[in-house]
Amino acid sequence: MEPICALTIAGSDSGGGAGIQADLRTFSAFSVHATCAITAVTAQNTVGVSAVVNLEPGAVVAQIDAVLDDFDVRAVKTGMLAQASTVVAVAELARAGRFATLVVDPVLVSSSGHALLDVGGVEAYRDVLLPHADLVTPNLPEAAVLTGISVHDIKTHDDMLELARRLLDLGPRSVLVKGGHFAASTVTEREAPDLLLGADGLFVFNAPRVTTTNDHGTGCSLAAAITAGLAYGRAMPDAVRDAKSFVLAALTSAASWRLGRGRGPIDHFGWNE
């Protein structure tokens, strides 16, 4: 059976845990033909990021045009866009109607704390890209930066809802605020709640918190899994629910892996087992 196509616009992770590599594996797990446009090349492993080389926005746009001119791309996902000029270039394509469905994962900082977006990038997200997004998927620190709220003030579900409302005011059709970064003492020690707010209403997706250091790339993979579901024509809440189940299985399957000395990757094909 001929697969459908999706596109990821993101950075390369040489350690294979996040970024383009995680997106391509996630699309493949959903039997989606994966196309890509690379925005930056990072030198990183499970311990951290040691170098980043950004591609010129024109090179990123050329990759996107090459894919869109030849493939029937049903959904597009952005990850690490690296620089404000690339955020603006992608937003221009969205404004021109080049993307059937757009999921924006606003990658600002790596899981090891390395900045992955240059000066002016946050403002570019707020002002020009988010208004064209069908869904934006920030974790709590990213949502706090985008809304100007201190992440230390986010302690309850109501706080998450206020974040989602403020993000929705920036123009996206739907917002998914991910709760995996909640400290164990705030909401719950055993759950990782995600909150979806948009045209379909309010939904809270809960899942058991998996105790593991192998969680590198969970955000990329969740957004890519949602993109795959939307490419199939799934309703937004259903696509998010499926993606949440996918990431839970991937975390559970890789929980005892020993790949690298730091935060290892998840098992993108764990749910097939």
Image (spheres, helix red, strand yellow):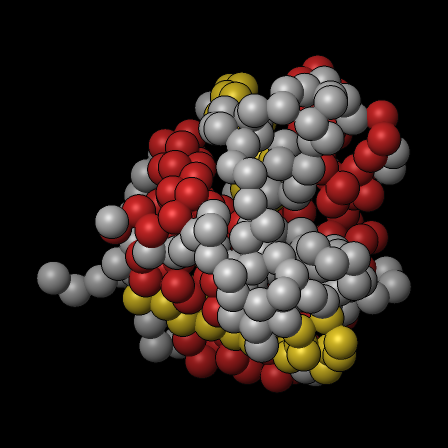
> Residue 107 lies in what quarter of the image?
bottom right
Nearer the observer, 20 or 35 = 20
Q: Is residue 129 something one can see in this rendering?
A: no
Residue depicted at 67% across the width and 79% down the height: 43
Q: Is residue 233 something one can see in this rendering?
A: yes
Residue depicted at 73% across the width and 22% down the height: 185
Looking at the image, residue 157 sits to the left or right of residue 273; the answer is right
Q: Please say if 129 is above or below 18.
A: above
Nearer the observer, 164 or 13 = 13
Report the number of numbered marks. Answer: 0
Q: Please say if 136 is above or below 236.
A: below
Residue depicted at 63% across the width and 65% down the height: 261
Q: Position of residue 3 (x, y in %)?
A: 22, 62
Looking at the image, residue 119 sits to the left or right of residue 7; the answer is right
Q: Position of residue 147 (x, y in %)?
A: 81, 37
Q: Please say if 180 is above or below 128.
A: above
Looking at the image, residue 233 sits to the left or right of residue 243; the answer is left
Q: Position of residue 195 (x, y in %)?
A: 58, 27
Looking at the image, residue 84 sits to the left or right of residue 203; the answer is right
Q: Which residue is farthest left?
A: 1
For the N terminus, give its image quadrant. bottom left
Q: Position of residue 56 (x, y in %)?
A: 70, 82
Q: Please say if 254 is above or below 191.
A: below
Residue depicted at 55% across the width and 38% down the height: 211
Nearer the observer, 14 or 202 = 14
